[in-house]
Amino acid sequence: MPQRKDVRENSQAMSEPRRPRRKRRSSRRGAEALPETGLSRIVVLLNKPYGVLCQFRPVEMTEPRPTLAHYLPVPDIYPAGRLDRDSEGLVVLTNDGGLQHRLTDPGSRQRARAHWKTYWVQVEGLPGPEALAALRGGILLEGRLTRAARVRPIREPPHLWPRDPPIRTRARIPTSWLEMSLREGRNRQIRRMTAAVGHPTLRLVRFRIGPFSLGNLAPGAWAMARDSEPAPPEPTRRPTPRRRTD
């Protein structure tokens, strides 16, 4: 009995071997791809400059804004927590989803050690004891108090690079610096906290996330962290002994 045409075509399609899918190549504008790193876990530390979007995908705008792709040639890594466009400093990027979760989840069991994020904050005016106590104890934002924070006045951090463009200051109002450490990351949280106590943030630089520190990285520079792990060696197969035929 002759086979129907559609049956023959289907059987022929099923018998043909499937072509292996091609791996997508990671494209990063403004940076050339690196050769194979030989690492199973990659942790990259980047000093994000002011005005850079904390993402890899470009944003369609009349004036294109720089993204992480302009600085990082390492493929398949993602930020563990973000920084606003007008904030600067440390961004940790990794291909390890577990590490990402531990660094960004405020409910983690290890939050006392790994979740502290520390910032240098230049504010308008000179915060007094009441303002500092309010920042440490919690500020009401959208009906919820912020978690207890570590806040202390500091001098301008040594070797801090000048911002481009420079901050806007008023001649009659002095500025001062605070070191603030948080265990949570709400939207523009530090800026809203300092504004709530009457001292708007003029400049915000993150320099530590848990065990990772900015170190001496210049704006736009990046480095591979020591937490990057070498890929395990491939298991070697022992040759199968041939059976004797005699």
Image (cartoon, rainbow, N blue to C red):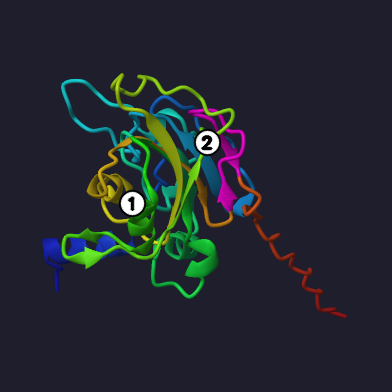
Q: Is residue 217 visible?
A: yes
Extreme-right residue of the structure: 246
Image quadrant where residue 171 sits: top left
Q: Where's residue 23, x and y in %?
A: 42, 47
Asked if residue 218 is among those painted magenta in the image, a careful observer would answer yes
Does 2 sit left or right of 223 as displayed?
left
Q: Which residue is drawn at 53% across and 57% down?
A: 210
Of the residues tagged 2 and 1, which is closer to the observer? 1
Image quadrant where residue 61 sits: top left
**Closer to the N terminus: mark 2 or mark 1?**
1
User: Badge 1 local density, few (<14 within 10 Å), some, or many (20+)?
Assistant: some
Front one among 98 and 218: 218
Disc number at residue 155?
2
Q: Please determine whether, in this image, residue 148 is positioned above or below residue 53.
A: below
Front one among 127 and 149: 127
Query: Disc 2 marks which amino acid?
Result: Arg
Does 167 sit left or right of 6 as displayed?
right
Q: Please determine whether, in this image, residue 104 is positioned above or below residue 176.
A: below
Q: Please determine whether, in this image, residue 220 is positioned above or below residue 142.
A: above
Q: Mark 1 points at which residue?
A: 131
Question: The magenta stretch spans which residues?
Answer: 212-224
Classified by dominant secondary structure, the portion drawn in magenta counts as: loop
Query: Disc 1 marks which amino acid?
Result: Ala
Does 138 sit left or right of 226 as displayed?
left
Q: Is mark 2 on a helix, strand or loop?
A: loop
Q: Residue at x 61, y 47 (%)?
A: 225
Asked if residue 145 is among those painted magenta in the image, a careful observer would answer no
Q: Is residue 17 visible?
A: no
Q: Do the residues labelled 2 and 1 touch (CB within 8 Å)?
A: no
Q: Where's residue 183, x and y in %?
A: 42, 61
Quarter of the image where the C terminus is located: bottom right
